[in-house]
Structures are given as structure tokens and as C-alpha cells.
Amino acid sequence: MSEPPKTTILKDPQSTDVPPTIISATPDEGEEATRIVNKITEFYKLEIWHNGIRQNVIPIYKPEVVIGRGSKSKPVDIALQGDLEISRHHLKLIWEAGNIYAVSEGRNPTFIENQLIPAGQKILVRPGITIKVCSYLLKIQSPRV
């Protein structure tokens, strides 16, 4: 016995005068149903400042983000250019169970709110704090900002 078609009602949430669109579909014999992927979640934003000028605000969608100068052999997610004191892999930001952690991986120091981060140690950071990577300042923002 054949399964009845699955019905999905789609309605534009912005419109009040357009009737909903109705789509009916069942997988054909031998075909697999489409796997629905979860919506991409923005964990937080990273505001990047260099020499007192805001350069960018980057939404972060990955649980681990590598920051540094980067190179062909050591790619980074966020490249900080123009300062040779920054290591190729200088800082890693990790999203874990709703918290953000910073791990200093550079040869030169990294500071959180003017406190030195010990190299290799995972330090909890919160939205609103400032991380100093040589001549750059990184500010963590909650995704709603």
C-alpha cells in the first residue's frame, strides 16, 4: 500500500495577504528522502581593530577558529596582516557548550583585558572582553549585536 503524500505548508512570514503555498511530495520508488540539515548557527561575532580603527566584524559559525598571520603551509580562519610579531597560528578561539575559550599559540604574548594568557592554556572569555594580539584588538560580541 502506498504512503499518502507528505504535505508542507509554506507561508511568507512577512506577508499577511498572500495565501500559503502547499507542496505535496513523496519519494519515488527506490529514492531516498532528502536529509534536512540544521540551520547554521552563529556562535558569536568577532570585532577586529588595528591601530585604533575598526577593520571588520566577522560572524563566527565554526566551533574552532584559528587566528594569526597564516601562510600557505599554515592556513588560518582569520588572517591578521601587517604585523610580523603575530605568529602564523597565534590564537585559537573555541566554542564549547555555550562558552568561548581562548588559547594562545603564538610566540609573542596575547592578553585578555590586559592580563597575559599563558601559552597553551584554555581561558574562558565572555562577550564584551578585549583580546590583544600584538597591534590588533579583538572584541567578542554576542550574536545578537
Image: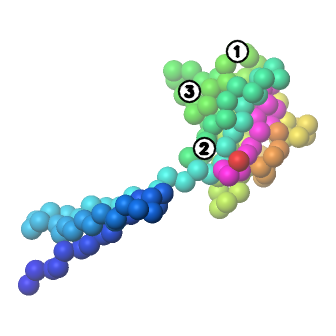
Q: Earlier in the sequence, mark 1 or mark 2?
A: 2
Q: Quadrant of the N terminus?
A: bottom left
Q: Earlier in the sequence, mark 1 or mark 3?
A: 3
Percent x, y for residue 55?
70, 25
Q: Earlier in the sequence, mark 3 or mark 2?
A: 2
Disc 2 residue type? Ile
Residue 110 is marked as none
> Relative to residue 45, is residue 32 depicted above or below?
below
At x 51% / y 21%, what residue is drawn?
72
Disc 1 residue type? Gly
Residue 60 is marked as 2
> Closer to the camera, 41 or 107?
41
Disc 3 residue type? Lys
Magenta region, residue range: 131-144
Q: CA distance from mark 1 to mark 3?
A: 17 Å
> Closer to the camera, 114 or 13?
13
Q: Which residue is mark 1?
A: 82
Q: Nearer the viewer, mark 3 or mark 2?
A: 2
Percent x, y for residue 86?
73, 23
| Residue 3 placement: quadrant | bottom left
